[in-house]
Image (cartoon, rainbow, N blue to C red):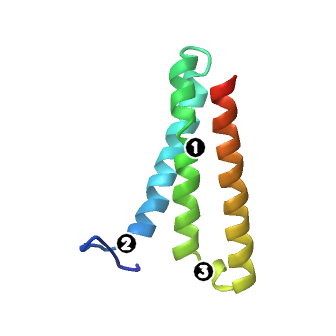
Amino acid sequence: YKPVTIAGVHLRSLYVALGIFAFYLLLLIILTSLILINKKPKLWKTIHISTYIVGVFVFFHALYVGTDLQNILVRYVWLAVGVVILLAAIVRSYRMRTV
């Protein structure tokens, strides 16, 4: 959709691919939540933590491919929400280490 070049490597539709990977990871998280939460809680928690990766993928996918974000006000709101979520994730990871 929108070609991207990173370190001289031409990636055709990185942002579309991020949305697809986010969807597949979300399916994996949902399926493991239905199947493993009571049987293997440690494995479930490890997989469940990948929701942070899904959030990052969805954020960049929407930022660069989303048609709603063409409106500058909506784009600023999206960026503000992204910053708040990033700060919450940092606080959460800090609290996980201290507990």
* Disc 2, SS: loop
Crowd around label 1: few <14 · some 14–19 · many ≥20 (10 Å): some
* For discs 1 and 3, the disc positioned in front in the rendered view: 1
Identify the element where label 1 is drawn. helix
The residue sitting at the top extreme is: 39
Return the residue at label 1.
51
Other residues around mark 2 within 10 Å, as few (<14) / some (14–19) / many (≥20)? few
Name the residue located 57 percent from the left edge and 34 percent from the top edge.
Answer: 48
Amino acid type, label 3:
Thr
Q: x, y (%) of residue 44?
A: 55, 25
User: The residue under label 1 is which amino acid type?
Assistant: Thr
Q: Marks 2 and 1: in contact by CB < 8 Å?
A: no
Mark-to-mark CA distance, 1 and 3: 24 Å
* Position of the N terminus by quadrant: bottom left
**In the figure, is residue 2 to the left or right of 45?**
left
Q: Residues within 10 Å of mark 3 (few under 14, many from 20)?
A: few
- The residue carrying mark 2 is 13
- Determine which quarter of the picture holds residue 35: top right
- For the C terminus, which image quadrant? top right
- The correct choice, above or below, for 74 with respect to 18 in the image is below
- The answer to whether 71 appears left or right of 10 in the picture is right
Q: Nearer the viewer, residue 62 or 56?
A: 56
Q: Nearer the viewer, residue 35 or 72?
A: 72
| Rendered image: mark on residue 67 | 3
Which structural element holds mark 3?
loop
Looking at the image, which residue is at 68% across and 61% down? 83
Asked if residue 2 lies left or right of residue 43, the reply is: left
Residue 31 appears at what percent x and percent y?
A: 54, 34
Q: CA distance from mark 1 to mark 2?
A: 22 Å
Residue 16, compared with residue 3, is above or below; it is above
Residue at figure coordinates x 58%, y 62% from the top left:
59
Residue 41: percent from the left, percent from the top?
58, 18
